[in-house]
């Protein structure tokens, strides 16, 4: 799973729920509720008196909710999963996760799952950009996406099959040793971070640096990159190699794979802390995403993930995926 889904998922799960952070119409509803029912009472609607309604009328008028300016997402239409093949949606140019030549580790895991089901893998290739899930999984073009956050909002998910982390990437010959966002060196060095989307939305590391006042020395590299070149998200790793930046903060599977292509030249270390309070995580559980309502398919894949655990671990290890659900040394690649 690429880092493209991580910030979207983090924003969904970290929406504040305090009264002062609600939308105006939500605050209005809350005040109306208190006026009608009291703070601790749950009175039946038929017990409301005309006097109480009248007392609340002025408040209701003052706090009339503005018209909503967003559209509720449509309910998932029931689309039956294939019974003859494992239909997978994936990005055709996104190593180490997937590509059209089926060289990514998510391609290998899809093949493993399909083989256990005695089915072939059939792909729908679609660039992982905005609208990916709406146009693929939810539209019925496929039944599964091999790598999504385990708490993803846009699909049902299996139990996680690995957990990874953002990492610091530096040139080994520079002698730069950074393990924490609180390291004072980050204020002096040029730091590369991944940006989610063409609109420049921030990834969790970008938020972490900004929260510490580290802004002017930060360069952003979109995870979409130039799609005309192979593996566009790898640009941030190339920036470290080419000395455009002194240190990059990148999603672990991406960094581990491309650092391994340059033996001895790059050092990869997990970031710390694992989470910035109140809710800014840098480690994520990754699962298989399945269209909602396909419970039987979800159960089947979960059983395969359990049964083929050692094979999946071997695939991830061969792609140098940093793991935080296993013993992880401070320096995972060099």
Image: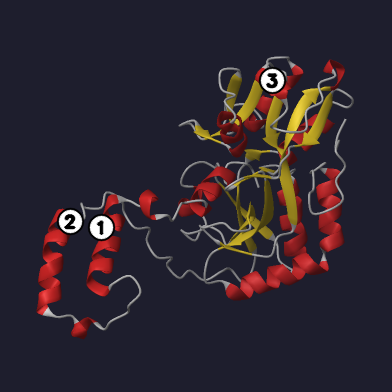
Residue 104 x/y as whole percent: 73, 44
Element under label 2? loop
Q: Quadrant of the C terminus?
A: top right
Q: Residue at x 69, y 32 (%)?
A: 181
- Residue 1 versus residue 212: which sits nearer the camera? 212
Q: Mark 1 and mark 2 in contact? Answer it, CB < 8 Å.
A: yes
Q: Residue at x 65, y 38 (%)?
A: 94
Q: Earlier in the sequence, mark 3 or mark 1?
A: 1
Q: Which residue is mark 1?
A: 28
Mark yes or no: residue 96 visible. no
Q: Which residue is mark 2?
A: 64
Q: Which residue is mark 3?
A: 239
Residue 280 x/y as whole percent: 59, 44
Q: Residue at x 74, y 63 (%)?
A: 113
Task: Give the CA distance from mark 3 to mark 1.
Answer: 49 Å
Q: Earlier in the sequence, mark 1 or mark 2?
A: 1
Q: How crowded is the residue under tag 1: few (<14 C-alpha within 10 Å), some, or many (20+)?
A: some
- Residue 54 versus residue 150: which sits nearer the camera? 54
Q: Mark 2 and mark 3 in contact? Answer it, CB < 8 Å.
A: no
Q: Is residue 216 left or right of residue 117?
A: left
Q: Earlier in the sequence, mark 2 or mark 3?
A: 2
- In the rendered image, which quarter is residue 173 located in? top right
């Amino acid at each position: 799973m690429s880092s493209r889904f991580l910030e979207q998922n983090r924003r969904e799960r970290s929406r504040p729920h305090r009264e002062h952070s609600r939308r105006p119409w939500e605050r209005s509803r809350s005040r109306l509720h208190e006026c009608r029912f009291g703070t601790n009472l749950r009175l039946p609607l038929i017990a409301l008196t005309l006097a109480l309604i009248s007392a609340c009328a002025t408040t209701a008028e003052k706090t009339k909710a503005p018209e909503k300016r967003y559209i509720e997402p449509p309910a998932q239409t029931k689309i039956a999963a294939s019974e003859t093949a494992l239909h997978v949606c994936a990005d055709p140019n996104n190593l180490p996760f997937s590509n059209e030549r089926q060289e990514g580790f998510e391609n290998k895991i899809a093949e493993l799952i399909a083989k256990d089901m005695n089915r072939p893998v059939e792909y729908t290739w679609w660039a992982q950009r905005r609208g990916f899930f709406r146009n693929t999984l939810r539209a019925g073009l496929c039944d599964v996406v091999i790598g999504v956050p385990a708490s993803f909002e846009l699909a049902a998910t299996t139990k996680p099959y690995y957990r990874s982390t953002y990492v610091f990437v530096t040139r080994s010959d520079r002698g730069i040793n950074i393990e924490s966002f609180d390291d004072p060196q980050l204020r002096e060095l040029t730091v590369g971070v991944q940006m989610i989307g063409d609109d420049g939305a921030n990834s969790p590391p970008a938020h972490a640096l900004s929260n510490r006042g580290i802004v002017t020395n930060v360069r952003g590299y979109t995870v979409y990159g130039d799609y005309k070149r192979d593996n566009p998200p790898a640009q941030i790793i190339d920036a470290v190699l080419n000395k455009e930046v002194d240190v990059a903060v990148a999603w672990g599977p991406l960094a581990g794979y491309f650092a391994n292509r340059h033996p001895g030249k790059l050092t990869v270390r997990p970031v710390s802390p694992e989470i910035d309070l109140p809710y800014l995580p840098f480690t994520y559980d990754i699962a298989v995403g399945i269209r909602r309502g396909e419970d039987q398919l979800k159960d089947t894949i979960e059983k395969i993930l359990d049964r083929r655990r050692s094979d999946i671990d071997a695939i991830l290890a061969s792609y140098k995926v940093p793991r935080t659900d296993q013993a992880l040394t401070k320096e995972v690649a060099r």
